[in-house]
Each structure stands twice: as C-alpha cells, then as structure tokens.
Image: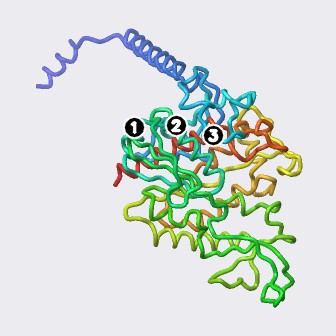
Amino acid sequence: MAARDDHHHNHVKKIPLFPLLSLLCFASIFLVLSLSRKTSSNPLLSHQSFQFGQNPVTDPNVAPSGSCDYSDGVWIYDHEPRPARYDGSCKEIFKGWNCISNNKSNGWELTKWRWKPRRCDLPLFDPVYFLEKYRNTNIGFVGDSLNRNMFVSLFCTLKRVSSEVKKWRPAGADRGFTFLHYNLTIAYHRTNLLASYGRWSANANGGMLESLGFKEGFRVDVDVPEGTWAGAPAFHDILIFNTGHWWWAPSKFDPVKSPMLFFKKGLPIIPPIPPDVGLDMVLKHMVLFIDKNLRPGAIKFFRTQSPRHFEGGDWNQGGTCQRLQPLSPEQVEGLFSLKNNGTNVEARLVNRHLKKALKRSGFHILDITHMSEVRADAHPSTSGGKKHDDCMHWCLPGITDTWNDLFMKHLNNIKFRD
C-alpha cells in the first residue's frame, strides 16, 4: 500500500506558481480600480459640503438597527437646482422674511442647500403625499415667531399643490388654514412664554412684592397657559411646541426696570426666582396641562431652540449677520459654546432646560438646533426691512423648509411604528 502511494505521488503534475500569482495580482488591481471608480462617481463627493456633528461615522449611508440621528449631518450644496417647493409669491410669507422678493444677494442660493444626515437620508417634503396621508387632521404650531416661520413654510409648501383654502382662526389661533379638498387644517397659536403673562404694577395698598421694593414688571403665572393656545391640545391631532427666545430678552424683560415676576396659584412666588428657574416651572406645568387636555391619540412634538447669529453685539448693539456661506464647525463653537457665554448662547441654554423638562414626558423632539447653528447665511439680515439686522428669523424659502422635512420624517416614523 505504501509503494502505491509513493508511485502516485511521483506522478502528480506540478502547477507553475508564476501564472497563478500573476492572475491574483491582476484581480487585485481590477478590484481597486473598480472601487476607485465607484467612489469618484459618488455625487456627495462632487458637491460642496459643510460638516457639522459630534459623532462622525465612516459610512454615512448605513443606519445601525434602522435608527438615525437626523441632527448629525452635513449641508450639501447642489449645483443643479431642484424644483422649488414654493417661491416668494406665497402671500403668507411675512414681508421681512421674503429674501427673494427683498433681493437678498443669496436669496435663491438658499434653496440649493440640503441637509444630509451622516447615517441615512432625509427625504424632501412631499406635499401631495402629506395632504393625502393626513386627511381630516388638525395640526397646530404653538410658540413664538420662529414657530410661525416653520408654519408659514409648511403652508406655502402645501398651497403650491392645493389652492382651495379656507382662512380662519381655529381654537383661538393667531392664523389658520384648512385645505378644503383634504380637510387638513394647520394653525399657528402665538405665545411667547407658553404661560400667561402681562404688565404688573405695585398696589398702593402694598403687598409681598411691594414690600421687597418692586414697583413694576411682568407678571408670569407659571401654572396658567396663555389663552391663545389653551384650547389647542383639545382641538389638534398633531402639535408642535416651542419656547425660548423671550426668556433671554433683557430688552423686553429688563431685570431691573421691568423684571419677570412669577406667580403660582394666583400668588407671587417668594422669594422671587430668576427667569431660568421660572422657565423650568413653566415647562413643568405646561407639560401637565397639555397631557391633561390632549385629545385621545394626539401626537405632540417639542422643537428645540432656533439659534441666532448676531456678530459684533446683540440686535440692539449693532450686531450683524452678513455671512453668505454656512459656518465651519470651529466657527459654530466660537458663536455658541457655553464656555464663551457669547451673544447667541441662549440656544444651548434653552435646550438644557428643555431636555430636563421633557425627559419621560412623551413628547417627540424635533432637534433642529445643530443643523441650524451652521446656517449663519440664512437669515434676512439687512433685507428684513428693520432698523437692525434680523439675525434671528429665517429667510423663506430657506432652512425652515428643512425643519419640515424633519417633521414629516419623524411623523411618518411614528405613524408607521404605531
């Protein structure tokens, strides 16, 4: 048996190594060239982009376990223009925000930027799909003028494809519209603090605040919602809340001449509390009020703080926003870092309070802060028609269109999940 094996071994044909190695080398070169060609054809790499995010990943198109942080991404400039979702002819656009009609130098350019999350895609808002899917639905925006900014963006987008509209003021709203063919209503409820507030003056007969030397200010009832939106939770199927800008507004609530004086159950809170503590109390009570009065099955969102971009001082100190390009990550941190305590620090301060108050509240969070911090170029600036630069509101069309892309994506995710 051993002899047969030796005989067989001696007659095995040997395969030359050189041709085999040559074949392997050729295959390797072909693979490298193929990958290189595929990478160079990636449209994302052929566009100008501005990156912002705290956790970059190697593959921006892969979302682990189907999840995605839409707030972490890149602004990409598309040189080939997309069809406009609306233009400056939409009559609901506040005059100061209509950067195209006001001839802002980069007004049209703003429509060419799109937000690309690192781990997934953010689809563009589809107005026809939205109207069809949310027939017989009431949607309410509750908050300050930045929520109106977002509301107007949504209205103009929908109006472009559905012109039969009834204008009215549902549930005490500042303004509202029903798209008659779909029975879909959207409304804006203006409220600066969420809580009820108004002028306060010292009583000649004295009182607790008077005994502390207060003569005038603004009374803020932390447990009473402002009447403009008190009926909104019971009326709307979907709600988007915000608050923040007015809480850090010394020009309105001067801490000496006209301070915010907080009341609870009709009585002043003694000792008086500062605005940041007042904000925490208001958020706590408003969350409870909303939950108590929310219609069954309603969906509630809270939008994070919209950043301002004043440079060289605040709005009443000669501050401006003349940039025509998005900011770099280093520039963003220079403007918004809490350590620097600069003019625009309110955005991240407010978000700290929101995060604390909304934890386990059942609110869905629309995190627009990070993506918006980059866009110092997207404010009306000097084209806003004011005596000072408007570095707080946003041009329309503009970045709030992307906020609505994000809103629709989150809303659809919730609907599909449920």
Which class describes the residues within 10 Å of circle 2: few (<14), some (14-19), or many (20+)?
many
Residue 205 in view here: yes
- Report helix, strand or loop for mark 3: loop
The residue that label 1 is drawn on is 129
Measured Cα–Cα span from mark 3 to mark 2:
11 Å
Q: Nearer the viewer, residue 172 or 302?
A: 172
Please tell me whether mark 1 or mark 2 is closer to you in this view: 2
Looking at marks 3 and 1 on the same chain, the residue that comes earlier in the sequence is marked by: 3
Residue 61 in view here: no
What percent of the width, then of the height, locates residue 18?
40, 10
Query: Relative to 69, does residue 327 appear above or below in the rendering?
Result: above
Please tell me whether mark 3 or mark 2 is closer to you in this view: 3
Q: Which mark is residue 157?
A: 2
Looking at marks 1 and 2 on the same chain, the residue that comes earlier in the sequence is marked by: 1
What percent of the width, then of the height, locates residue 140?
51, 55
Snapshot colouring: rainbow
Which class describes the residues within 10 Å of circle 1: few (<14), some (14-19), or many (20+)?
few
Looking at marks 3 and 2 on the same chain, the residue that comes earlier in the sequence is marked by: 3
Please tell me whether mark 3 or mark 1 is closer to you in this view: 3
What percent of the width, then of the height, locates residue 343?
81, 53
Q: Splitting the image into 4 quarters, where does residue 204 fall?
A: bottom right
Disc 1 residue type? Tyr
What percent of the width, then of the height, locates residue 111?
61, 30
Residue occupying the point 61% across, 67% down: 226
Q: Which mark is residue 369?
A: none
Residue occupying the point 70% across, 33% down: 99
The residue that label 3 is drawn on is 93
